[in-house]
Amino acid sequence: MDPKRELSSIDLSALVTELGRYEGAKVDKAYLYDDDLLRLKLRDFDRGRVELMIEVGDVKRAHVADPAHVADAPGRPPNFAKMLRNRLSGADFAGVSQYEFDRILTFEFEREDENTTLVAELFGQGNVAALDETGEVVGSLSTVRLKSRTVAPGAQYEYPASRLNPLDVSLDAFARHMDESDTDVVRTLATQLNLGGLYAEEVCSRAGVEKETPIDEADEEIYRALHGALDRIAERLRSGDIDPRVYEEPLEDAELDDPDADRPVVDVTPFPLSEHEGLPSVGFDSFNAAVDEYFHRLARDDAAEADAPADASASRPDFEEEIAKQERIIEQQRGAIEGFEEQAETERKRAELVYAHYDLVDEVLSTVREARENDVSWDEIEETLEAGAERGIAAAEAVVDVDGSAGTVTVELGEDDLAVELEADDGVEVNADRLYREAKRIEGKKAGAEEAIESTRRELEAVKERKAEWAAADEDDDGGPAGEDGGSDGDGDDEEYEVDWLSRSSIPIRSPDDWYERFRWFHTSTGYLVIGGRNADQNEELVKKYMGKHDRFFHTQAHGGPVTLLKAAGPSESADPVDFSEETLREAAQFAVSYSSDWKDGRGAGDAYMVEPDQVSKTPESGEYIEKGSFVIRGDRTYFEDVPCRVAVGVQCEPVTRAIGGPPSAIEGRAATSVTLEPGMYAQNDAAMMAYRTLKERFADQSFVRKVASADRLQEFLPPGGSDIVD
């Protein structure tokens, strides 16, 4: 079975109590690994060092980790980590809560000058948002702009639409939600009751109910058994009666000789599951410790699998399986949309029936309210209504259930005797309005599902395109996909096959450490290095320290551009005069224009000029003043007019692995894949995230992209100002 990579809502319910025990710990520092693993280092008076880990990528988790399981701090902190350090350093951890039954944890931090809330979204694409005391987003790992909600700096944080909590639903409400399904018991528990596949099966097993029982064959006895099993799980979580387990893969026959060998992990749960009865497991004193151990071992298992020799027969992706998977997801999403439509229509129908039977509903509610005001018990109210029904009183006959614990009365209305649950303390209009609002909320979920299905369709088309590319490569290479062989083509030419990096299941990381990476930089299509300043200090440094006598100096006509040097050689290398090609010079000019105020002002093109190093001076004319980072240019200039503002960012896979960016003509030949941008409407960080997601989707080894070309790393190559991706 595939190992679990995301904590469930039930897992988070069990974790919250344990995480709350660290209340009062002080935050030392925040770290961000890649673009999806947040580490908060805290100090607790009793426990000492506390490492809180929140991961929202392919793996989604939140727990306190054993310091031995924590990797060394990464290098220069990205902007999100810097922001958290400014807001959280010295703050007290004030508590954690789970939002309703969703996979969302809310961490509260208090400091004398300001309080901060961290919201960890452990579902979907995953996200972490930092909020100020008013609930406004200060910063987030990802910007979300959907019809249903927005998560963006400066906006009020919006939680997703509420979901039914199966752990506190009444028996009547449970039965009603089950009856609204047209599938079997286990699928209904998984989807309508929000339990997910594993715990839906577990509830069926504990209740002794056949999982595939059709809903229309499920009777009251079955519902009571299922609801009772849910209640028992809920009680264990509420009382803290847990018995955590980390489950492992069973031993194969070949492994029986070494029963102590480490086995891959497959699941972690707060208590033993009947569904995992045949799996070996390890017990823990706390669920947090079990979760920490599980994900530590999962990372080790993944690393071992990545390092294992590749199976040549497995080098070609299983496109048919992936296409079938995406089609299954689309089918499920269509079913969900249909279900939301039916639910919304049912809630609207309930609201309309309340108004259509206004007098009857009002009589029921008034009778119950008057009885409660006179301290009549709910049991007596139920008995009175039953007696009234026997005497043929229409209002009493309509009542089918009275739930004192919830303060509700359920009536059957209309020709179809549709059950409508009414809040006894509210009037007819308020109850009808609540039903209309519920219909609107469900329609919001439908909108989210429609967005999801469009995203899945795009993924399906991408897989089909990759399949077609492989098929074309198979034909061109006489049956072997590109990258399988090197050497000649059989005609004596020494043309090499290109490696298909996008389809590689694992790409080895070879990190460079070049002196120029703190500047803006790129290599031209002819191989020369171009570097530019990020600010006035770097402009000064480039001219004074790194400009050689055979280099070329570029700048834009527009004010506010970087010093750009086309290097003839490295800083410690001797250089000879170079006759740079026109292509090389234009790429350097495009670099200077694209990172200037031309881009920031939204212009599609700009002018640049080139001079020799000896024409650049820091000595102003008599009576003039030169600002820091600016220079005096004397003599003739070579101009490059109407140079397009265009930048490409991409992922380089050989001879080193890293993010690169610069003029498209220079980047496209060096990157395994790239994205081109132009001046536009999206802020720099949003554009970087869009580019990152686009690039990540093209690789089979998506973890590789996260490690070498995260959104923060791509952002370093984007010009200041707004950008759009060029289609």
Image (spheres, grey):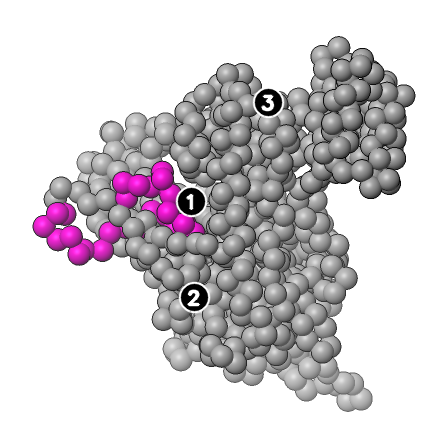
**Local SS, label 2:** strand
User: Residue 235 location in percent, x, y?
Assistant: 52, 48
Residue drawn at point x = 61 percent, y = 57 percent: 97
Q: Is residue 647 left or right of residue 262?
A: right
Quarter of the image for the C terminus: give it.
Answer: top right
Q: Tell which tag, 3 or 2, sits nearer the viewer.
A: 3
Of 684 and 272, nearer the camera is 272
Percent position (x, y) of residue 146?
68, 42
In the rendering, which numbered label is found on residue 179? 3
Q: In this rendering, would 363 be left or right of 518?
A: right
Mostly what secondary structure, the magenta segment?
Answer: loop
Say if the magenta span includes residue 270.
yes
Res 699 label: 1
Asked if residue 702 is positioned above or below residue 550 in the image, the reply reads: above
CA–CA distance in space, label 1 to label 3: 43 Å
The kind of residue tagged 3 is Asp
Q: Quadrant of residue 490?
A: top left
> What is the C-alpha distance between the residues marked 1 and 2?
30 Å
Which corner quadrant of the image does residue 620 belong to? bottom right
Find the magenta span and give its range: 255-279
Tell me which label, 1 or 3, sits earlier in the chain.
3
Residue 99 or residue 74, whichever sits in front: 99
Between disc 1 and disc 2, the foreground one is 2
The residue nearer to you, when weighing 487 against 223, is: 223
Query: Which residue appears at 76% of the width and 38% of the height?
Result: 377
Please state which amino acid type lies under the numbered disc 2: Ala
Find residue 444 and report its image quarter.
Answer: top right
Residue 65 badge: 2
Q: Earlier in the sequence, mark 3 or mark 2?
A: 2
Residue 602 point in image, percent of width and height: 73, 53
- Residue at image coords 50%, 62%: 18
Distance (Cα) linking label 3 and label 2: 43 Å
